[in-house]
Image (cartoon, coloured by chain):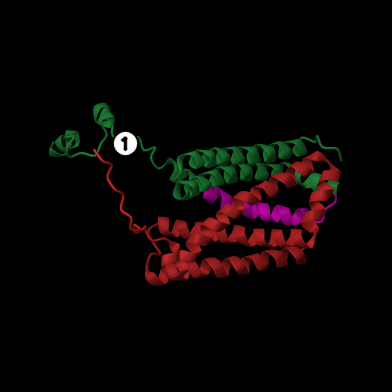
Chain colours: A red, B green
Amino acid sequence: MAPTARPTTAQPLSPHLQIYRWTWTMAMSVAHRITGTALYGGTALVAIWLVALASGPAAYGWVAGFFGSFVGKLILFAYTWILLHHMLGGIRHFVWDAGIGFDKTQRLGLARLTLIASAALTVIVWAVGLLAR
Amino acid sequence: MAKEATRQNPSVSIRTPRARVRGLGVSHHGVGHWWLQRLTAVANVVLMLAFVVIIARMAGRPYPEAIRLVGSPFVSLILILAVLSVTIHMRLGMQVVIDDYVHAPATKIAAVFANNFYAVVVAVACLYAILRVSFGQPPV
């Protein structure tokens, strides 16, 4: 029996992100995944920091020097925002887990709040951190 | 009894033959991943806020002071709990990302292996370092 000929025309694929108009909830959903993945990689930095501390003054001096540099501070600042954004995104999920916050205005407000509050909290954390020095 | 009859009818019920034979119903283990993700998420909120404070207080400290801070019982305990909760949480999260985006069998197996190894290596490295500092081994 002859093999069945495959169709030569391009088959429609299931639509993905690039098809849709971007919305706040969609953007914050994607941001939750991206921030989660960034934090996943960031734990390696925490491990390096702790292992350096346990290794001795020389190793710790290198790591502390790097995180004290401009690039290091930039990474820590970004890390703070990424952490707080993911945290607030998680709290948003808890609100939904409780079965509330699904209205159009509510879910839009929650999505916007995630971004605005994470940015505001990041600035507050750094302001307090630098002033308390 | 009509309900039970439907359950036992293989052409109507979606229960697996094994489940039907055992007759025990669901084991309630199906939501294990979801539940542990939520449980560690709640723990992470508290522990990571404490972690941010610890990091802020560590900034710019000379080595002996840094050792004393991380090695103090309270800070060590917070860090140990944070490492455990975070590495479990991140391993589950990456598992979902892999499930959603990696479909080729060989790549998927490699990704799942890498995810588990990474989470364990990060966890063990952090815990070892915290304990070493806490128990006073590093040269000051």
User: With B45 as the anchor, is A67 left or right in this view?
Assistant: right
Q: Considering depth in this image, is B56 or A54 the residue closer to the camera? A: A54
Q: Percent x, y for residue A81?
A: 63, 62
Amino acid type of disc 1? Answer: Val
The residue at which mark 1 appears reads as B26
Can residue A133 be spotted in the picture? no
In magenta, the rendered stretch is B39-62
Q: Percent x, y for residue B47?
A: 61, 50
User: With B24 as the anchor, is B138 left or right in this view?
Assistant: right
Judging from the image, mark 1 belongs to the subunit labelled B
For the C terminus of chain B, the quadrant is: top right
In percent of the image, x 69 and y 48: which residue is there?
A46
| The magenta stretch spans residue B60 | yes
| The magenta stretch spans residue A105 | no
Circle 1 Cα neighbour tier, 10 Å, few/some/many (<14 / 14–19 / ≥20): few
User: With A87 as the anchor, is A11 left or right in this view?
Assistant: left
Q: Percent x, y for residue A102?
A: 38, 64
Q: Considering depth in this image, is B112 or B21 the residue closer to the camera? A: B112
* Magenta stretch secondary structure, dominant: helix
**Residue B116 occupies quadrant:** top right
Q: Secondary structure at mark 1?
A: loop
In percent of the image, x 53 and y 47: which residue is there?
B94
Q: Percent x, y for residue A97?
A: 41, 55
Q: Considering depth in this image, is B101 or B27 the residue closer to the camera? A: B101
In percent of the image, x 75 and y 36: which residue is there?
B132
For the N terminus of chain B, the quadrant is: top left
Can residue B90 be spotted in the picture? yes
User: With A4 as the anchor, is B115 left or right in this view?
Assistant: right
